[in-house]
Amino acid sequence: MLVAFKLLRGIWHVLMGWVVIYFRFPQLTPLQREARVQAWAIQLLRVWEIDLEVRGRPVVVGPALLVCNHISWLDILVIHATRHCRFVAKSELREWPLIGTLATGAGTLYIERENRKDALRMVKEMACALKDGDVLAVFPEGTTGDGIDLLPFHANLIQSAIEANAPIQTLALQFVDATTHQISMAAKFVGDDTLVQSIWSTLNAQNLKAVVNFGELQTADGRDRRAWAQALREDISGLKKAC
């Protein structure tokens, strides 16, 4: 019953977020919208009794590209709770009921993952957004992992930071048991896991805590996207070990 109650409270919170985006966002400034998104994410974590620990210091202002490992559907919510950013997500997300509206309202950029040519368009769109001073976020693994090992990084979208001459900030995300500090698999969303199974497992977990460890801002320093992506992967691996 407790899990069902948390789920219902979460659904209500999502609905209220949809109402705010649809009716209030048109009257708000970009900074006010960003603050609303962050506050909404923080509150949903509280509703679902997920603790949040932030280590390091998130970038204060843009331009910047955040690069993070990917574990779960919950990652975006957790990162939004640390600071607002514009995520790059698969285009299918835009059509999801409620979630699509929330994602679009939060400034998500959409990419057609099956279309290689669309990556070129996305790099240009991201570079323009970075030049405008935005903070963007990507998961260069391209899909979710188990939270223990890192998958290979795709370097394509890293090119946007090079073209915009913008810095990148790495961050490592891990879900742990707040009591034992051991890695928790409750929130994983990988392989044959369904979204419903993952949500139920997440809400059923006791003492679940998300740990976000921010690294330092870094620039390309003459590296191409592949060399930089490899260095970023190594940096995130080190940050994960410190979680």
Image (cartoon, rainbow, N blue to C red):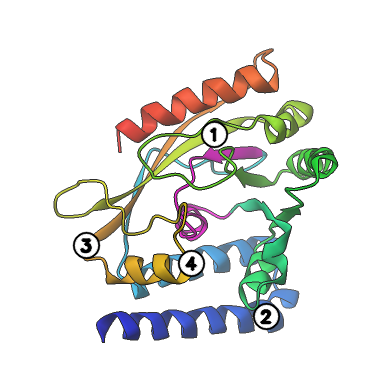
178 vs 140, left or right, is: left
Q: Which residues are magenta?
A: 64-84
Q: Which residue is mark 4?
A: 195
Q: Residue flagged by tag 2: what amino acid is it? A: Arg
Question: What's the CA distance linking mark 1 and mark 2?
Answer: 31 Å
The reply to whether the C-beta atoms of the residues labelled 2 and 3 are less than 8 Å apart is no
Q: Earlier in the sequence, mark 3 or mark 1?
A: 1
The reply to whether the C-beta atoms of the residues labelled 3 and 4 are less than 8 Å apart is no
202 vs 139, left or right, is: left
Q: Secondary structure at mark 1?
A: strand
* Residue 192, image x, y percentages: 46, 57
Name the front one of labels 1 and 2: 1
Name the front one of labels 1 and 4: 4
Q: Residue flagged by tag 1: what amino acid is it? A: Gln
Q: Residue flagged by tag 3: what amino acid is it? A: Asn
User: Which labelled disc corresponds to residue 169?
Assistant: 1
* Residue 232, image x, y percentages: 53, 26
Which of the pair 206/134 is nearer the observer?
206
Question: What's the CA distance linking mark 3 and mark 4?
Answer: 21 Å
Residue at screen point 73% across, 29% down: 159
The reply to whether the C-beta atoms of the residues labelled 1 and 2 are less than 8 Å apart is no
